[in-house]
Image (tube, rainbow, N blue to C red):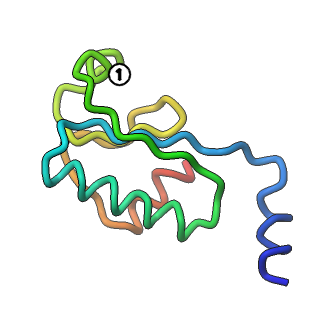
Amino acid sequence: MVLFFNILNNIGEKMKSIKILGSGCAKCNKLYEMTNQAASQLEIEFEMEKVTDMAKFVEFGVMITPALVVDGEVKVSGSVPSVEKLKKLIKS
């Protein structure tokens, strides 16, 4: 029943594309883990990718990592927000 309700709630919503930009440092890995947790708690469809190519950082205008990119928009750079804050960033 809950699954059916969640499917109905997500009708018309496209899958979120989430990228974590970073070199692979501890903060980058932490942002990846926390973002995965936040997106999972939102019960949305999403795909996540770790991006370590510095040329891609420049394409997004990111100078400080880690950075969170949702659907092509940089939401956070240089910090690791709380799971609750990440949920808001992913939804917005």
Q: Which residue is mark 1?
A: 60
Identify residue type, mark 1.
Phe
Classify residue 55 by image quadrant: top left
Q: Is residue 63 above or below residue 59?
A: below
Number of marks in the image? 1
Q: Nearer the viewer, residue 57 or 89?
A: 57
Q: Nearer the viewer, residue 59 or 92?
A: 59
Residue appearing at x 58%, y 66% in the figure: 42
79 w.r.t. 59: above or below: below
The N terminus lies in quadrant: bottom right
Q: Position of residue 10 (x, y in %)?
A: 77, 58
Q: Residue at x 41, y 37 (%)?
A: 69
Determine crowd level at label 1: few under 14, some 14-19, many 20+ residues with C-alpha closer than 10 A. Answer: some
Q: Is residue 84 left or right of 67 when viewed as pictured?
A: right
Q: Left or right of 77: which side holds 27?
A: left
Q: Residue 30 in the image: x percent, y percent?
A: 24, 59
Q: In the rendered image of this protein, does residue 39 appear above or below residue 22?
A: below
Residue at 34% x, 15% y is 59
Q: Secondary structure at mark 1?
A: helix
What percent of the width, then of the height, locates residue 82?
31, 66
Residue visible at 33% across and 33% down? Answer: 51
